[in-house]
Each structure stands twice: as C-alpha cells, then as structure tokens.
Image (cartoon, rainbow, N blue to C red):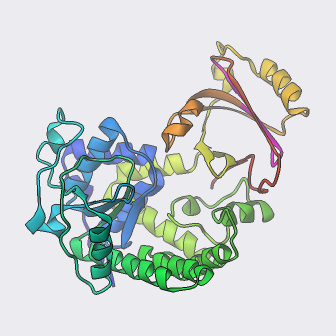
Amino acid sequence: MIMPIFISAFSLSSHVMEILEDLAVKHPAFTAQLAAVIQGRKPVVRVEFELHGEDYVNFIELLTKLRLVWFEHSPHPVRICYASSLHKEVAKDVKVHYPRHPAIRNYDFLRLSAVLRKYEEFWSSLTEGKIIPLDLSGGELNSSSEIIIARDSEGLKNFLTLYATAREQYKQTERTMAIELFDRFLGMAFGYPGCCTEKFAKDRKGKRPKEDYIFYESIVERGFENAVPVELRTVAHVPCDVVCEPSIDLGREYLRVLMAFDPNAFEKAIKELRKPTLFIDRWHHITINEKEHTAMPDLTVTEEEFIGKAEKEMKTKPKEIVLGSIETVPFLYLTEFLGLWWIGVDPGHSVFMCNAETRRAKLYQKHGVRSIADLRIYRYK
C-alpha cells in the first residue's frame, strides 16, 4: 500500500517551481499525475510525450530536485537508465548532449547499455524481487525514450517487478491470453481502475486495433462531445466509459493533490485541461486556444473568406467554426499544426483547417473504416 505524504512545492527554489508551472501548461494531465506520485497517491507515472533541448534539461532538473527516481526504457538498442540512488554501486559519469547547462553537469544518473542476454537477465532477476548489475558502456541521454517515474526506489522496484512478471507470463502463455494477462498486470502496476483495465484487456484480446478509441467512442455514443468531465482528461489510462465513476474520482484526486502541492501549477493546468481538443484521429488530437475573431481585425483570412473556402473543400457548410491558436504539441510530427487556424468541422465526416495568417490549408475527410470518434471537437466541463 502506498502511504501518502504531504509535500509543498513552496519548499523548492523559484526556478524549479517555474519549471513545474511551465510543465503544467504544456502537459497538464501529466503534471497532476506527477503530483499524485510525489504525494504517494499514485504508484508511478509514465512520460508519454517528447522532451527536447531546454525542455528535457529542465525536466531532468525537476526530477532530481524533487528527489524522484525513474527508469528509462529504450530496447532498440537495449538501454536502461535509472537514478543512481537505485543502484549506487554501479554509478558512473555519463556523457550528456547539453554540457552548457550547469543543472545537469553533475547529473546523478545512470545511462546503461547492455547486450540482449544481460538485458533478459535483468528482467528475470526482477521476477524474484532482485536487481542485478548490468555491464555498462556509458551512453548519452535520450529524450525520446519511455520514462517511468516513482517516488522512491522501493516504489520503482515494485513497478519493475510487476512489469518483469508480466513479461515472463507473456512469454509462457498462448498469445491472446498473454496479451490480456499483460494488460491486467500493467493496469495493476500503474494503479488504474479495475473496470478500465478489464475493458482494455478484453478489447485487446479480441484484436481490436485501436483500444484507445473505447473512451472517445463512448463520448459520441452518449452525446457528451460538449460536456466531457475534465477529470477524465487528467487520468493516464483509457477510461472504459465517459461516465466511469472510478476514473472521474481518480482524476479529481489528482487535481486535488496538485492544487495542494502547487496552487499556481494547478490553476495553469486546469485552464489548459478545460480547453477544447481537435480530434482528427488517434494520432492527431491537439488542444485549441479559442480566439474571438472580432478582436483580431487584421487577419489575413477573414471568417467570410474561410467559410467560402470550407464549403468548397468540404462540399457542405461546416457545422462548427472555430478560430484558435495551437501553441503546444506533444510530438515533433505535429509541429506543422502550430499557429493560428480557422477550423471548420462537420462532426464525424470532415475537418477543414486554414491558417489565418499564411493561408496554408488542410482537409481531413472520412474514408475507409474510420472510428465515429474521429473528425470532431471535444469540449470539457
């Protein structure tokens, strides 16, 4: 059982608090989940976005100042890294990509690289509750690896042990059953609600190719597109339904913990979480900062001009028109969406976008087997 502790961000330096509050703007749900880990309300949190350059440096500084431990997993090539507090006897200096930043010059961090046999031995030992040393070969920080963060070494070891057990079961079980067991183990390790883990596991067992649509399709089916509970945008897992009470309660708890930990970060995070999402498909869902076009009279593309373009491209009048800026994206492949856009939506059928300053346009239409969740704008309350 995770014992809650109570820490305030006000004990941190102003620079570290600024890093946390910047993270709350760019990745609000993750920030709430991180606060829950810090306060012992969540076992671990996973980084599911890219960090590059200054953002990565600041993130590492935040983790070290908060005295958190983590595991970074990038198996191709096989590399493992975790805070040296987990395995001090093999601590080594690392070569870093950003030597100009004093914050990580003396970075207390392991970057491991191991041959595949040693990698497998590492996981096998964890099934027995042990961590064995790996043959190290130095290495470099990699900002695109999956990172699992825990409050302390014991919590991280518990998660890794569950993950290792799931891997072992996966190898020894018939494939469809193995996938279901693996998902159940991971759901337990991450602290997800049982109902959501069960739904996710069953859909995977049925070889459903896009499990994360479970949640978004339930929004459309229940008519919640303009009233999604903001708590559900705060959780890390795929809720089994838009009215899933355990998920709503979990999201509410994460937000409450963040508010107690750093009120400024909470205010920034909740503001971002309440902004609408443009959901083109599962690979393209982006937060929109809505703008009032009457307050922006010098736009290169006027509303009237946009409507004409949209009707021509979409072959129908858009049911919803939004002027909004896209200021942050979670992955580099989405950077082409940054900017100020007119967005026209025929829900479930098409989305037409036109940059209000450069006139660059994009058209997305329903084709093939698309989910009913695609090509929509979702709003939160």
What x and y, as percent, mark residue 80? 29, 61
State the residue in front, 266 or 343.
Answer: 343
Q: From the viewer's perspective, is 376 left or right of 262? A: right
Instruction: Please name whichever residue, 56 or 72, is drawn nearer the observer in this view of the structure.
Output: 72
Q: The magenta stretch spans which residues?
A: 343-357
Mark yes or no: residue 116 visible.
yes
State the image coordinates of residue 89 (x, y, percent, origin top left).
8, 68
Residue 17 at what x, y percent from top left?
27, 47
Give above or below for 162 relative to 308: below
Q: Main secondary structure of the magenta part?
A: strand
Number of numbered discs overlaid on the protein picture: 0
Residue at 14%, 38% (x, y): give it: 102
Left or right of 141? Residue 48 is right
Q: Is residue 257 left or right of residue 60?
A: right
Q: Is residue 18 visible?
A: no
Q: Is residue 345 magenta?
A: yes
User: Looking at the image, is 166 positioned above or below residue 142?
Assistant: below
**Identity of the residue drawn at 69% across and 22% down:** 294
Q: Nearer the viewer, residue 17 or 111?
A: 111
Quarter that holds the N terminus: bottom left
Q: Quadrant of the C terminus?
A: bottom right
Q: Is residue 145 magenta?
A: no
Q: In this view, which residue lies farthest toward the left?
A: 89
Q: Which quadrant of the structure image shows residue 100?
A: top left
- Depth check, front residue: 362 or 128: 128
Q: Quadrant of residue 101?
A: top left
Please give the name of the residue rendered at 38% of the width and 53% of the height, measured from the top-left corner.
145
On screen, 245 above or below 275?
Answer: below
Residue drawn at point x = 24 percent, y = 77 percent: 154
Residue 19 point in image, percent of width and height: 30, 44
Side (left or right) of 334 relative to 115: right
